[in-house]
Image (cartoon, rainbow, N blue to C red):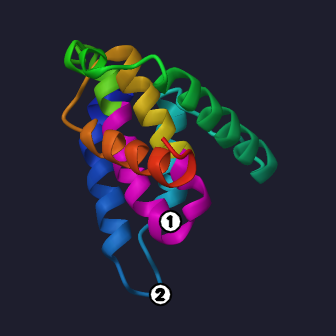
Amino acid sequence: KCPILHKMRAYHILMDASSVQVTSNPIADPVDLGFSVLSKLDCNFPKTSIGRNLKIIVGLVTLKVQASKWDSNTFRNLPVASDVTDAAVVKTLDKFSHEVYFSNPELLPMSILKSFRRTMSNGISPYSPPAFATVGLMMVSHLNN
């Protein structure tokens, strides 16, 4: 049996191909595929919209409280992510965010918050900057920070 990390490149290519396919018979639903891949990486989303909305509200409130303690050194001193699983999760969340932006936008804040939290706790990866930018946008537009 092949470990999930060995399959990540194939999953990411499949997610990209599914998102650009315009026929009536897509290869796979990119959002469902994203959920499947993320759950295999132990990055799960609540099943119900009430659960997702509650998680988003808690995440935004927590973000606002934590942001009051940050300064420029907080981000400057973040280590580079060394765990390949964490890097794979952040990359998959980045791809997933692109998909949900167009097809299921209510999932976008949760996806971004998960990516941001993982970056803050496990270090920066090449796919962390979109999460930083989007969290900044959410803080300015919704949290008045």
Mark 1 lies on residue: 29
Left or right: residue 74 versus residue 62 is left
Mark 2 lies on residue: 24
Query: Residue 1 or 44: which is nearer the viewer?
Result: 44
Query: Residue 54 or 83: which is nearer the viewer?
Result: 54
Q: Position of residue 121 (x, y in %)?
A: 40, 15
Query: Residue 25 or 137: which is nearer the viewer?
Result: 137
* 21 in relation to 39, above or below: below
Q: Earlier in the sequence, mark 1 or mark 2?
A: 2
1 part of magenta stretch: no
Q: Quadrant of residue 116?
A: top left
| Amino acid tagged 1 | Asp
Q: Residue at x 42, y 25 (%)?
A: 118
Q: Residue at x 46, y 16 (%)?
A: 69
Q: Which region of the structure is painted magenta?
A: 89-109
Q: Main secondary structure of the magenta part?
A: helix
Left or right: residue 113 versus residue 125 is right
Q: Position of residue 37 (x, y in %)?
A: 46, 41
Circle 2 residues within 10 Å: few <14, some 14–19, many ≥20 = few
Per the rendering, the mark at residue 80 is none
